[in-house]
Image (tube, rainbow, N blue to C red):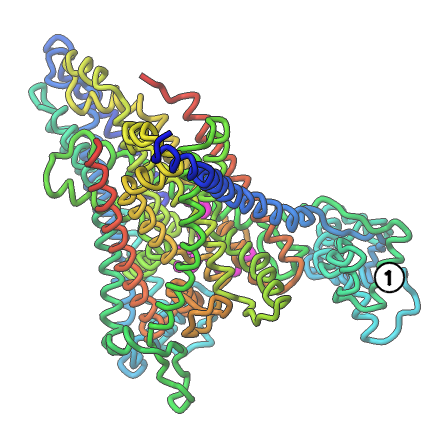
């Protein structure tokens, strides 16, 4: 049975369990003289029965589905005769793919070795057996659960408390998904990174000056080892982020100051949402804009004054990324500037300072921690930004601080290393996870520091 | 007059000038931001508007059974694989007699898109009596022709077309047999290597399934988590830890979620690559912080008097929340969810990681079919070398942006209409 049908059947069974529980609670209440003699409302008895039907069955189904593919794979591999057993992980993957294709009929079984054909047949048998087994087990568990829930209903039972407890636990589990996600991210990048550092020493990765991750097909090829020195990537990332911040911080800050301190209400009510539209534009759109409009313009401008500009210059990507971050800086700065108490402004103006002097000498220093926090958040945004640089920055890992040359970034390399290529074990694929780890740690640190600064500052005036 | 006043008066001019300068910087900053916005939109619209129409040429096509190489008209198989391109070639040869030589013939045949053959096939399958008849039809032109037709006089000089092809097109134009028609394939087809046949429908359906999965997972989980944190969570280290995690996840780069999806959902749980289900799960994890944060704000906005009234009537904590607080907070939560969905709809990077970048021609039929999504389609097209794809990419961007604008407008509307102020 297909999983979708099984789920539908389960939904019907849950509804049935609800109905049965509802009926039984009424039946039990009638001889006592009505439902007011029950401990809880009939709804809770019915819900309790439905929960008994649903939760054990769903838990078993979930666990089963999570691991059945892996188990079947292992069983199929074990069934292979020792002679055709693959030597390493990547050829094992290839073989599994082949078996899968034979099993689904994409490759005729006459075209492959008999061992593979036998394995494919075994795979099909196992899959069929598996789907039968999961259907039977889940349905039986659901029925048992319903029966148990139904039998236990009694007028004294504290059904409401039990149902509420279950709901509250579900709510709590939903909240812990945030923790699980963080743990999942850490685990996935850590494990793969550790495997990567097993192949390439961590010092080579962190301090190496050359990045050329192509691993060779043959051992005797030139540059067959591939070089995994990440310094050029870090420099490229920093260069582009620095350009972005050079654009976004002054523009964002001055817009926030103007909107908060000078702009009439009508201008503010129009300009603030308009600026925020910039934050809502998908990054892939910025990437397209940077690659096809901004980069050629910069190239032409540069050539007209006799400069040699790469067609994928860091300047184009950084400039457009800066535009993207303007609203982050401006809305965060706007928040902290408006949070500065009016009394400070009045005092400064009362002493005869002009508005700009008040802003520069009084408001800005008071808002500085918040603004710094905002800038750090913007920086973490710029470092982690992917699509703009994938589309507008280059692939060649140049060590340069010249914004007119092409550089590559950490995120660009993660994308290039992981798209297309399937093998999980090569140093190339693992390197992407090591880069991911670096990225995660950097942005995490920036965020923690930024949030800390913002929080600490807020406490002063509240 | 005292000496100090004198000094102040002297410096006043300078100070006022500084004041003016400062204000001008502010206006310039706002102007820069708005200019960037206007530039972005006009650039996209300027590049993309032409893709909504494509060139068709009018020709007399004879459904000749011999050319088609069909023996038996009732045989579906034969009908499917008949030589429809041959009909078009015959029509072209008839229109321009005297074309000799292989090279020249190839140039002539290149005027018409390979998609035109499919159109003839569909016509014949609808109505088998067409055999032997001649019809005057609008046939889809090749993308190079389309670029040439849409180009201005100067750009025409740089076209990839040969001199012969230009001459033929001008013949069509002179006879008024070449026109721009609404680009239907853009909204009905999946991806294609041929720009004139490529469409966004496959990507739109993929996005739709992905968004459905994301909504079904992230809204209930987000609301449940928000309720727990606002109403039930004890004040302890564990709760603090959850909060720290949520705040950090909100700022983790999206590509990291792609790595998580690749390593855990695909690698560990063995789910298939390139499917909307996995995409939806990854985007759920990414949007959850947004939804949780906005849902919490909505719950906080419900006044305590409502809670106290319900409790005074004997409702349990859970009943207070589910019967009173939740319905009142729901509009605010919905607004947050729509904004989160809009974010997820525009997201590209994590989906690249889980393999949704494959070249997929078929329109997906469910969340378990391999598919791509609208932003990824934009990314793929932006990389394509053909000039027509620039316009197509911009058109796809316009469609994506209009979806986003619609969703955000809906959110603003909901907020104004449904959100109550106490």
What range is drawn magenta here? Answer: B344-361
Q: Nearer the viewer, residue B275 or B226?
A: B226
Q: Nearer the viewer, residue B366 or A244?
A: A244
Q: Residue at x 30, y 38 (%)?
A: A362
Image height of B243 relative to B159, above or below:
above
Q: Is residue B360 part of the magenta span, yes or no?
A: yes
Q: Where does the C terminus of chain B fall, quadrant-wise?
A: top left
Judged left or right of residue B170, residue A39 is: left
Q: Residue furthest left?
A: A156
Q: Nearer the viewer, residue B354 or A26?
A: B354
Q: Residue at x 35, y 19 (%)?
A: B420
Q: Residue at x 40, y 49 (%)?
A: A249
Q: Which residue is mark 1?
A: B168
Q: Is residue A130 part of the magenta span, yes or no?
A: no
Q: Position of residue A215 (x, y in %)?
A: 39, 80
Q: Residue at x 22, y 50 (%)?
A: A180
Q: Nearer the viewer, residue B289 or B319?
A: B289
Q: Residues within 10 Å of mark 1 (few under 14, many from 20)?
A: some
């Amino acid at each position: 049975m297909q999983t979708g049908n099984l789920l539908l059947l389960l939904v019907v069974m849950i509804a049935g369990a609800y109905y049965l529980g509802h009926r039984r609670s009424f039946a039990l209440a009638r001889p006592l003289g009505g439902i007011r003699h029950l401990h809880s409302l009939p709804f809770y008895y019915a819900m309790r029965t439905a929960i008994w039907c649903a939760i054990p069955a769903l838990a078993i189904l979930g666990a089963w589905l999570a691991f059945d593919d892996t188990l079947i794979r292992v069983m199929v591999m074990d069934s292979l005769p020792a002679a055709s057993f693959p030597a390493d992980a990547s050829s094992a993957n290839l073989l599994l793919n082949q078996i899968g294709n034979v099993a689904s009929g994409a490759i005729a079984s006459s075209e492959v070795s008999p061992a593979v054909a036998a394995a494919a047949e075994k795979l099909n048998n196992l899959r069929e057996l598996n789907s039968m087994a999961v259907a039977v087990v889940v349905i039986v568990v659901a029925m048992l659960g319903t029966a148990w829930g139904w039998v236990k209903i009694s007028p004294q039972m504290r059904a409401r408390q039990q149902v509420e407890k279950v709901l509250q636990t579900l709510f709590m589990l939903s909240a812990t998904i945030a923790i699980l996600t963080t743990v999942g991210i850490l685990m996935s990048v850590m494990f793969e990174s550790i495997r990567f550092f097993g192949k390439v020493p961590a010092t080579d990765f962190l301090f190496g000056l050359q990045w050329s991750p192509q691993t060779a097909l043959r051992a005797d090829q030139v540059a067959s080892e591939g070089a995994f020195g990440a310094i050029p990537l870090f420099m490229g990332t920093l260069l582009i982020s620095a350009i972005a911040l050079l654009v976004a911080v002054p523009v964002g800050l001055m817009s926030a100051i103007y909107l908060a301190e000078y702009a009439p209400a009508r201008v503010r009510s129009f300009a603030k949402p308009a600026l925020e539209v910039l934050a809502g534009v998908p990054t892939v759109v910025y990437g397209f804009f940077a690659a096809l409009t901004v980069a050629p313009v910069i190239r032409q401008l540069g050539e007209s004054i006799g400069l040699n500009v790469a067609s994928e210059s860091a300047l184009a990507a950084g400039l457009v990324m800066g535009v993207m971050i303007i609203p982050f800086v401006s809305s965060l700065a706007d928040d902290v500037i408006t949070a500065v108490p009016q009394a400070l402004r009045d005092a400064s103006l009362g002493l005869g300072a002009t508005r700009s002097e008040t802003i520069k000498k009084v408001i800005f220093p008071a808002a500085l921690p918040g603004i710094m926090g905002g800038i750090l958040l913007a920086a973490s945004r710029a470092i982690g930004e992917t699509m703009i640089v994938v589309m507008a920055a280059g692939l060649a890992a140049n060590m340069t601080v010249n914004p007119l040359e092409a550089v590559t970034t950490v995120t660009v390399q993660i994308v290039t290393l992981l798209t297309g290529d399937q093998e999980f074990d090569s140093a190339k694929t693992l390197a992407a996870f090591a880069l991911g780890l670096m990225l995660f740690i950097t942005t995490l640190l920036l965020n923690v520091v930024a949030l800390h600064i913002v929080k600490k500052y807020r406490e002063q005036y509240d | 007059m005292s000496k100090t006043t004198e000094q102040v008066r002297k410096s006043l001019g300078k100070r006022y000038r500084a004041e003016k300068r400062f204000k001008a910087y502010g206006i310039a900053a706002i102007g820069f931001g708005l200019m960037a916005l206007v530039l972005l939109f006009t650039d996209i619209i300027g590049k993309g508007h032409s893709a909504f129409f494509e060139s068709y040429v009018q020709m007399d096509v004879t459904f000749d059974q011999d050319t088609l190489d069909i023996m038996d008209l009732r045989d579906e198989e034969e009908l499917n694989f008949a030589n429809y391109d041959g009909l078009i070639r015959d029509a072209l040869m008839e229109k321009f007699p005297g074309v000799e030589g292989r090279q020249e013939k190839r140039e002539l045949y290149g005027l018409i898109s390979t998609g035109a053959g499919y159109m003839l096939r569909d016509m014949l399958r609808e109505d088998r009596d067409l055999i032997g008849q001649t019809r005057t039809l609008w046939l889809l032109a090749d993308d190079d022709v389309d670029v040439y037709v849409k180009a201005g006089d100067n750009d025409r000089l740089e076209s990839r077309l040969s001199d012969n092809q230009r001459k033929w097109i001008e013949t069509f134009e002179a006879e008024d047999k070449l026109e721009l028609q609404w680009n239907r394939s853009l909204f009905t087809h999946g991806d294609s290597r041929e720009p004139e046949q490529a469409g966004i429908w496959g990507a739109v359906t993929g996005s739709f399934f992905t968004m459905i999965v994301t909504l079904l997972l992230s809204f209930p989980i987000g609301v449940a988590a928000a309720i727990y944190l606002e109403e039930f969570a004890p004040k302890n280290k564990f709760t603090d830890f959850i909060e720290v995690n949520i705040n950090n996840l909100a700022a983790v780069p999206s590509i990291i979620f792609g790595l998580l999806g690749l390593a855990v959902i695909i690698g560990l749980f063995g789910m298939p690559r390139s499917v909307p289900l996995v995409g939806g799960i990854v985007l759920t994890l990414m949007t959850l912080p947004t939804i949780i944060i906005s849902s919490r704000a909505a719950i906080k906005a419900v006044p305590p008097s409502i809670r106290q009234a319900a409790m005074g009537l004997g409702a349990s904590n859970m009943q207070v929340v589910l019967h009173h607080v939740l319905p009142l907070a729901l509009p605010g939560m919905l607004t947050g969810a729509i904004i989160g969905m809009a974010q997820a709809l525009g997201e590209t990077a994590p989906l690249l990681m889980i393999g949704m970048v494959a070249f997929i021609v078929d329109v997906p039929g469910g969340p378990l079919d391999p598919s791509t999504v609208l932003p990824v389609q934009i990314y793929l097209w932006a990389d394509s070398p053909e000039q027509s794809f620039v316009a197509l990419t911009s058109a796809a961007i316009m469609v994506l942006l209009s979806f986003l604008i619609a969703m955000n407008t809906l959110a603003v509307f909901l907020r104004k209409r449904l959100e109550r102020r106490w």
